[in-house]
Image (tube, rainbow, N blue to C red):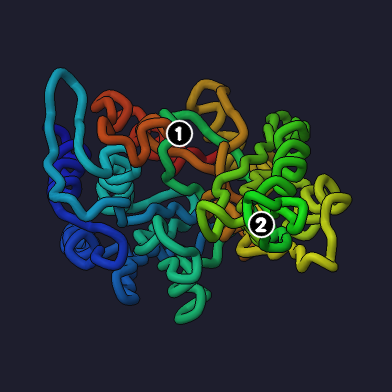
Amino acid sequence: MSEVLDLAVKLINTPSPSRSEAAACDLIEQRLSGAGHLELHRIGDNLIARTILGRRRRLVIAGHLDTVSSSEPAAMLEGGILAGLGAADMKGTLAAMAVLAAEVTDPVNDVTWVFYAREEIGRSESGLLEIATAQPELLEGDVAILGEPTSGAVEAGCQGTLRLVIRLGGVKAHTARPFMGVNAIHRSAAVMADLIAATPRRVELDGVTFVEQLQVVSVEGGVGHNVVPDQVTVVVNHRFAPDRDVAAALEWVTSLIEGHLDPDLGDSIELADGADGAAPALGDPVLARLVEITGGQVSAKVGWTDVATFAALGVPAANFGAGDPLLAHHPDEHVAVEQLDSVADALRSLLGDASVA
């Protein structure tokens, strides 16, 4: 069993649901504590390991420790497949990171390895933000790689996201005499029809295509089986290309429905939450070389990731890791052992490539 596989099994067998990552962080800290070339920092359940070699550039390689479930994990290895909670998202890649952090003592660029907590829950609790608040210099770098599952290919940038709450009013009445009221749920039908009929954009940036999405994700209303409802709430999620920010994306969604809104009935639109995306940044020599090393395949990242957090810190970043992203949070979550090795080999090659120094 390779070092990467052995550590991946141990990490999967170490429960680390969000807010309970201490044991997984301890495991990686113990592995790196004897590495004399690394400067270690522990901030809560976040571990940062850095080389201080005076190189011209610094590469940040980051991955989250938490999983989405608190169920008891159990690693299962059979036929070259490693299965178990977090195998793809993203304990296999964490294992590769930890092994390389200890192994590669003389990288061509200084490297900051970041193992952080609470990525899978509300962004306000993110371990990356905890580090940025406590010691922001620990996240400084010229370029970053985020170990999200990408099936071993580079996924550039990420989409932005927003969640919009639309509240439509009406007037209560008895369902036998609906003409005495205004049915808020019926009014929502026109709003949802326009949302469903909308055509989100396909946007090409840096040679990759971002496909936007717009979905109604929740509808709530009704006060009784014989009452015309006077209120309905429609929740919308929009994933948008990183050439727009939250404000521009909100303006577009609002434009689709504003003609249906009646302030006299108390209609309103509220931005519940939102986060900007991140541009692909494939012009950075490290990211461009990683694309070459992995066979030249690159695509836009579907969904939001902490690539956007690094972009907001002024650090261009891309996603790269083992495991199929479609299996993240799936009951059949698994990763091919061969892919664990290939991801580790690609990062090892990148760390020793003088062309990106």
Residue indicated by mark 2: 164
The amino acid beneath tag 1 is: Thr
In the rendered view of the protein, which quadrant contains the N terminus? top left
**Left or right: where does residue 163 sit relative to residue 120?**
right
- Looking at the image, can residue 241 be seen? no
Q: CA distance from mark 1 to mark 2?
A: 28 Å
Left or right position of 292 against 261: left
In the image shown, does 61 or 279 lie closer to the viewer?
279
- Asked whether 247 or 45 is in front, the reply is 247
Q: What mark, if any, has residue 150 been given in the picture?
A: 1
Q: Is residue 324 visible?
A: yes
Q: Does dot 2 land on a helix, a strand or a loop?
A: strand
* Percent x, y of residue 164: 66, 57
Q: Residues within 10 Å of mark 2 (few under 14, many from 20)?
A: many
Amino acid under label 2?
Leu
Residue that appears at 26% across and 51% down:
69
Image quadrant in which you'd find residue 88: top left
The residue sitting at 55% across, 49% down in the picture is 218
Instruction: Answer above or below: position of 86 versus 268.
Output: above
Which residue shows up at 34% across the image and 43% down it?
Answer: 89
